[in-house]
Image: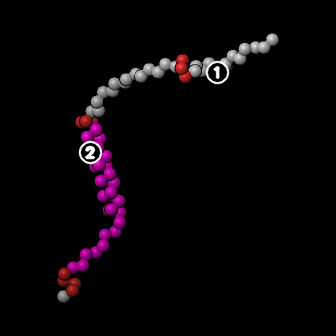
Amino acid sequence: MARRYERKTGQRQQSERELTIRAEFHEPPDLDKLCELLIRLALQQSGACRSEGSTQPKRPRASASASS
């Protein structure tokens, strides 16, 4: 009694496969919100750079009267 081979994976052969393509539509980006976010991030970053610069001691300026 020879048994016939039976696939157990459930996969189909390539010739039996069907491919479908589905388009997904997304709303266009809200440019006002994106601009506002970009401005906020830039201001935040420039504020952080300024605060880092203020923690470093400033060099004393040479006065013009000291050389005379």
For residue 10, which quarter of the picture?
Answer: top right
Helix or strand or loop: what does disc 2 sit on?
helix
Front disc: 1 or 2: 1
Up-down relation of residue 64 to residue 24 (above or below): below
For residue 13, which quarter of the picture?
Answer: top right
Quadrant (top left/top right/bottom left/bottom right) for the C terminus: bottom left
| Mark positioned earlier in the residue sequence (1 or 2) | 1
Counting other residues with Cα less than 10 Å from the Cα at mark 2, is it few (<14), some (14-19), or many (20 or more)?
few
Q: In this view, does 55 lie to the left or right of 3?
A: left
Q: Which residue ends up furthest to the right in the rendered image?
A: 1
Closer-to-camera residue (32/2): 2
Report the label total: 2
Q: Which residue ends up furthest to the top in the rendered image?
A: 1
Q: Which mark is residue 9?
A: 1
Identify the residue at image location x=30%, y=73%. 59
Q: Which amino acid type corresponds to the residue marked 2 in the rendered image?
A: Ile
Counting other residues with Cα less than 10 Å from the Cα at mark 1, is it few (<14), some (14-19), or many (20 or more)?
few
Distance (Cα) linking label 1 and label 2: 55 Å
Identify the residue at image location x=31%, y=49%. 44
Which residue, given by chain and number where applicable, does mark 2 sit on? 39
Location of residue 55 in the rendering, given as x and y in whole percent from the top left corner: 35, 63
Location of residue 18 in the rendering, given as x and y in whole percent from the top left corner: 49, 19
Up-down relation of residue 12 to residue 52 (above or below): above
Q: Give the range drawn in magenta.
A: 34-63
Name the dominant secondary structure of the magenta segment: helix
Please tell me whether residue 23 belongs to the stretch shown in magenta.
no
Identify the residue at image location x=72%, y=14%. 4
Closer-to-camera residue (67/22): 22
